[in-house]
Image (cartoon, rainbow, N blue to C red):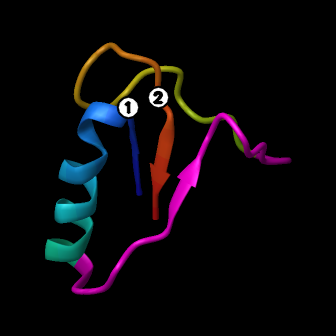
Amino acid sequence: MYVVCKDHVELAIDRFVDEYEDAPDVVDLDKTQFAAWDPPPHCEECEKHAQFLVV
Protein backbone atom coordinates (compact mmCIF):
# COMPACT_ATOMS: atom_id res chain seq x y z
CA MET A 1 0.00 0.00 0.00
CA TYR A 2 1.35 3.40 -0.97
CA VAL A 3 0.00 6.86 -0.15
CA VAL A 4 1.32 9.37 -2.65
CA CYS A 5 0.80 12.71 -4.34
CA LYS A 6 -0.15 13.14 -7.99
CA ASP A 7 3.53 13.46 -8.97
CA HIS A 8 4.47 10.08 -7.50
CA VAL A 9 1.43 7.95 -8.39
CA GLU A 10 3.19 6.33 -11.39
CA LEU A 11 6.18 5.43 -9.22
CA ALA A 12 3.87 3.82 -6.65
CA ILE A 13 2.06 1.84 -9.37
CA ASP A 14 5.41 0.59 -10.73
CA ARG A 15 6.52 -0.47 -7.26
CA PHE A 16 3.24 -2.24 -6.60
CA VAL A 17 3.45 -4.17 -9.89
CA ASP A 18 7.09 -5.10 -9.20
CA GLU A 19 6.23 -6.36 -5.72
CA TYR A 20 2.89 -8.11 -6.31
CA GLU A 21 3.01 -8.80 -10.08
CA ASP A 22 -0.57 -7.56 -10.36
CA ALA A 23 -2.28 -4.30 -11.24
CA PRO A 24 -3.20 -2.15 -8.22
CA ASP A 25 -6.35 -0.26 -7.42
CA VAL A 26 -5.84 3.50 -7.24
CA VAL A 27 -8.14 5.37 -4.86
CA ASP A 28 -8.52 9.15 -4.91
CA LEU A 29 -8.25 10.14 -1.23
CA ASP A 30 -9.92 13.49 -1.87
CA LYS A 31 -13.12 11.68 -2.90
CA THR A 32 -13.03 8.71 -0.50
CA GLN A 33 -13.25 8.45 3.27
CA PHE A 34 -12.59 5.39 5.40
CA ALA A 35 -14.45 4.59 8.60
CA ALA A 36 -11.54 3.08 10.51
CA TRP A 37 -8.43 4.59 8.88
CA ASP A 38 -7.07 8.09 8.38
CA PRO A 39 -4.54 8.34 5.56
CA PRO A 40 -1.24 10.09 6.19
CA PRO A 41 -1.42 13.79 5.29
CA HIS A 42 1.77 13.74 3.18
CA CYS A 43 3.10 11.75 0.25
CA GLU A 44 5.52 8.95 1.14
CA GLU A 45 8.04 10.37 -1.34
CA CYS A 46 7.82 14.10 -0.63
CA GLU A 47 6.00 16.65 1.53
CA LYS A 48 3.11 17.30 -0.88
CA HIS A 49 -0.51 16.52 -0.04
CA ALA A 50 -1.22 12.78 -0.24
CA GLN A 51 -3.88 12.39 -2.92
CA PHE A 52 -3.84 8.73 -3.95
CA LEU A 53 -3.87 5.34 -2.26
CA VAL A 54 -2.33 2.58 -4.36
CA VAL A 55 -3.42 -0.87 -3.13
Residue under pointer 1: 5
Asked if disc 1 and disc 2 are in contact, CB closer than 8 Å, the reply is yes
Left or right for 34, reference 16 = right
Disc 2 residue type (three-letter): Ala
Q: Please tell me which residue lies in front, 28 or 41.
A: 28
Left or right for 42, reference 10 = right
Q: Please give the name of the residue rendered at 17% of the width and 63% of the height, measured from the top-left corner.
A: 14
- Residue neighbourhood size for the residue with mark 2, other residues' Cα within 10 Å, grouped as few (<14), some (14–19), many (≥20): many
Residue under pointer 2: 50
Residue range highlighted in magenta: 20-36
User: Main SS of the magenta segment?
Assistant: loop
Q: Does the magenta stretch include residue 24?
A: yes
Q: Is residue 49 magenta?
A: no
- Residue neighbourhood size for the residue with mark 1, other residues' Cα within 10 Å, grouped as few (<14), some (14–19), many (≥20): many
Give the Cα distance between marks 1 and 2. Answer: 5 Å
Disc 1 residue type (three-letter): Cys
